[in-house]
Amino acid sequence: MDKTVKTFLKRIVILSLIISTIGFLLFFFVIPQYYLKIFPFTLLFFFAITVGSFLFLQRANKKKFSNYSAKLTMLTMLKMLSFLTFIIVYSTIYTENAATFVSAFFGMYVIYSIALNHALVDLNDSNKEE
C-alpha cells in the first residue's frame, strides 16, 4: 500500500474516532434530547465516501491533468447528489428531528471535506516532488 494512502487512512480513522467521541459526549451528556440514532451510520457514510473519493482521485491523479479534473468534477457532482438524497430521504421520514440531522450532517460534511482536500493537496505536493 502506498505511503500517502496509509497516511490518509490513519488520519481519517483518527478524525472519525474524534468525531464519534465528540458526538457521543454531546448526544449523551450535553444534549441527549437531540440524539440521532442514525449518527453512527452517518459517520460511516462519510468515512466510506471520503476514503472512496481519495482512492478514486489518487488513481486519477497518476494520469494527465485533464483526466483528473474531469473525474474530480464528476465525483463532486455524484457526492453532492448522494448527500442531498440522504438528507431528503431522512428528513422526509423523520421530520421531528430533521433540523438536528441536517446540522450534524452539515458539520460532518465540512469536516470531512476539509480532510479530503487537505489529503489531496498533500498528494499533489508529493507527486510534484517525484
Image: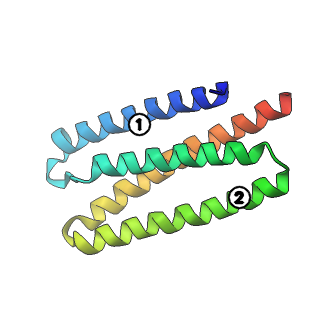
Horizontal arrangement in the rendering, residue 75 relative to residue 71 (left or right):
left
- Indicate the quadrant where residue 24 lies: top left
Horizontal arrangement in the rendering, residue 95 relative to residue 52 (left or right):
left
Closest to the observer: 2 or 25?
Answer: 2
Residue 80, compared with residue 29, is above or below; it is below
Q: Position of residue 78 (x, y in %)?
A: 56, 64
Q: Position of residue 82 (x, y in %)?
A: 47, 65
Which quadrant would the C terminus be assigned to in this image? Answer: top right
Residue sitting at x 76%, y 38%: 124
Q: Amino acid at mark 1?
A: Ser
Residue 71, compared with residue 128, is above or below; it is below
Residue sitting at x 55%, y 47%: 52
Which residue is tagged 1? 16
Closest to the observer: 40 or 61?
Answer: 61
Closest to the observer: 114 or 40?
Answer: 40
Which residue is tagged 2? 71
Question: Please, what secondary structure does the residue beneath circle 1 have?
Answer: helix
- Indicate the quadrant where residue 62 lies: top right
Residue placed furthest toward the left:
33
Q: State the separation of the CA atoms marked 2 and 1.
A: 26 Å
